[in-house]
Amino acid sequence: MTLSLDERDRRYRAIKNMMEERDLSILVVAASAMSFGHGRYFSEYFPHSAYAYVIFPKEGSPTQFVHSKIQQQVAATKWIKDSRFGSDYPDVVTERIREFDWKNKRIGLVGVDKEDRSHI
């Protein structure tokens, strides 16, 4: 089921309001094939295998990282047009965060269990 751009805009407004309330500048959103809800909420895409990440800034456009070139092509047809292949997640996620004015700002992490942080 495809959701509308109006629904995307409603969600993004709600997310940005929450970020403002919590003084967050960037959210790093993790999703996996087994636990895709957070990622899908932000991007309308869920990974079919491995993990995917959304970098969601309070200001600017979000970026999504997926595990394969095929996933990149599929993900780019959804809400986040800046979909990138990047299986070395710590490096590509960190590099994207550095592209924002991130110093002295708070970054939130969504969708990762405290017990399972092996993929970040």
Image (cartoon, grey):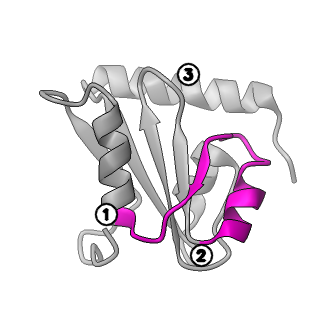
Q: For this view, does 33 lie left or right of residue 74?
A: left
- Residue depicted at x 38% and y 48%: 28
Between residues 95 and 110, which one lies in front from this camera angle?
95
Which image quadrant for residue 26?
A: top left
- Left or right? Give the position of 70 relative to 53: right
Q: For residue 81, what is the image quadrant?
A: top right
Residue at the spot of label 2: 33
Q: How far separated are the C-alphas under marks 1 and 3? A: 28 Å
Residue at (56% x, 71% y) in the render = 67
Q: Nearer the viewer, mark 1 or mark 3?
A: 1
Q: Earlier in the sequence, mark 3 or mark 2?
A: 3
- Which label lies toward us, 1 or 2? 1
Q: Residue at x 67, y 60 (%)?
A: 72
Residue bearing mark 3 = 13
Which residue matches tag 1?
Answer: 90
- For the residue marked with disc 1, what is the amino acid? Pro
Q: What amino acid is found at the position of numbered circle 3 in the picture?
A: Arg
Mark 3: secondary structure: helix
Q: Label 1 neighbourhood size at 10 Å, few (<14), some (14-19), many (20+)?
A: few
Q: Is residue 110 above or below residue 85?
A: above
The residue at 34%/34% (across/down) is 99
On residue 31, the disc is: none
What amino acid is at disc 2? Ala
| Location of residue 39 in the rendering, given as x and y in whole percent from the top left corner | 56, 55
Vertical order, 92 against 69 (above or below):
above
Asked if residue 85 is among those painted magenta in the image, a careful observer would answer yes
Tell me how many marks there are.
3
What is the magenta range?
Answer: 68-89
The mark that comes first in sequence, 1 or 3, is 3
The spot of residue 50 in percent (x, y) is: 54, 78
